[in-house]
Image (tube, helix red, strand yellow):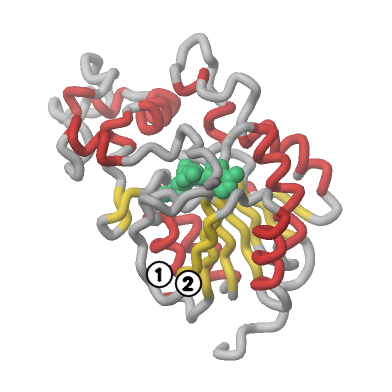
Amino acid sequence: MPPSQPKDNQPRAKWAKRFGLPRPAAPPSRWPWSRRADPMVRDAQYAPRLRASLSEYLNWYFSDKAFLHSIDWMGIPTRKLVTDMWVYQEIIAETRPDLIIEIGSFYGGSTLFLAQMQQLAGGGEVLSIDVSHAHFRAEHPAIRTLTADCSDPAAVARARAMGQGRRVMVVHDGDHHAAAVARDLRLYAPLVSPGMYLIVEDGVVDLFDARHSKFGRAYPEGGPLKAVREVLDAMRDDFEPDPRRERFILTSNPRGYWRRRGELPRPRLQD
Ligand SMILES: C[S@@+](CC[C@H](N)C(=O)[O-])C[C@H]1O[C@@H](n2cnc3c(N)ncnc32)[C@H](O)[C@@H]1O
């Protein structure tokens, strides 16, 4: 029996039919703040949209499904905030992982992005783990997939074996319920090599007040930020948060960028 599909693994076809995807982001007229204008901006067309606060923008980015489902990397849907993708690129170029373990593949847009960044930085693989790869569309020589519940001991053992003696980075973008994230962090944090990064995605869901945001009601028991505070803050001997990675302000991963203390392991052979 394959594991049951989590609710956030919804096929885009549902939205493609309804919204005619792929297509550009929703037009400004759909934006909730478009009736107001920013007096600092003199251009009449752009003044209303630039009135939005950062919280309005983030709330819209993650709760407007038509928009969220329109985000592609190289033609494959992904669920990332684009500023975070830039930060990923910086981390990969600086640390040059031999292996990135990605928990949560979905369509594979993020997997392809990671594989291509690896290639540009000089090589390295991506192991992408998901309970289902039914919608996965990414193809790249650096991509390995593992269809399994990431908390299955066999999946953890496979990831550990692949990372043995290599520079390993981990990206958690799987089940975002706090309890599941906490469980996964305890299993996968030890696989991260000294000097390398552990990234916990989508703690942004914990920032929003349920009374004012539908998005804020998504995880009533808490999401990734709650898990980070429980688990990684207790691992401060081994991990340190890297707030520089949040310097664009707009991030899906508040307190989600962690560096394992210690020196980077030996350079890759091709270095
Ligand atoms: C938000 S999506 C991943 C998005 C993708 N990383 C991207 O940025 O395009 C979350 C994925 O995690 C997967 N998932 C949820 N729980 C999981 C688990 N326990 N083990 C492995 N994958 C899981 C879901 O099937 C879903 O495809």
Count of marks, rendered view: 2
What's the amino acid at mark 2? Gln
The picture places residue 126, in percent across and down from the top left corner, at 52, 67
- Dot 1 falls on a residue whose secondary structure is helix
Q: Is residue 158 above or below residue 51?
A: below
Is 77 displayed left or right of 209 in the figure? left
In the image, residue 87 lies at what x, y percent? Answer: 49, 55
Residue 28: name its quadrant.
top left
Q: Residue furthest top?
A: 211
Q: Is residue 225 left or right of residue 136?
A: right
Looking at the image, is 98 positioned above or below residue 188?
A: below
Q: Which mark is residue 45?
A: none
Residue 243 screen position, x and y as percent:
63, 47
- Location of the C terminus (image quadrant): bottom right
**Residue 155 to residue 9: above or below:** below
Q: Is residue 227 visible?
A: yes
* Residue farthest right in this picture: 237
Q: Pick out the residue farthest to the bottom.
A: 270
| Pointer 2 local density, CA inside 10 Å: few below 14, some 14–19, many at least 20 | many
Residue that numbered label 2 is attached to: 118
Separation (CA) of disc 1 from disc 2: 5 Å
* Residue assigned mark 1: 116
- Horizontal side of residue 62 vs 238, given as left or right: left
Q: Nearer the viewer, residue 210 or 48?
A: 210
Q: Secondary structure at mark 2?
A: helix
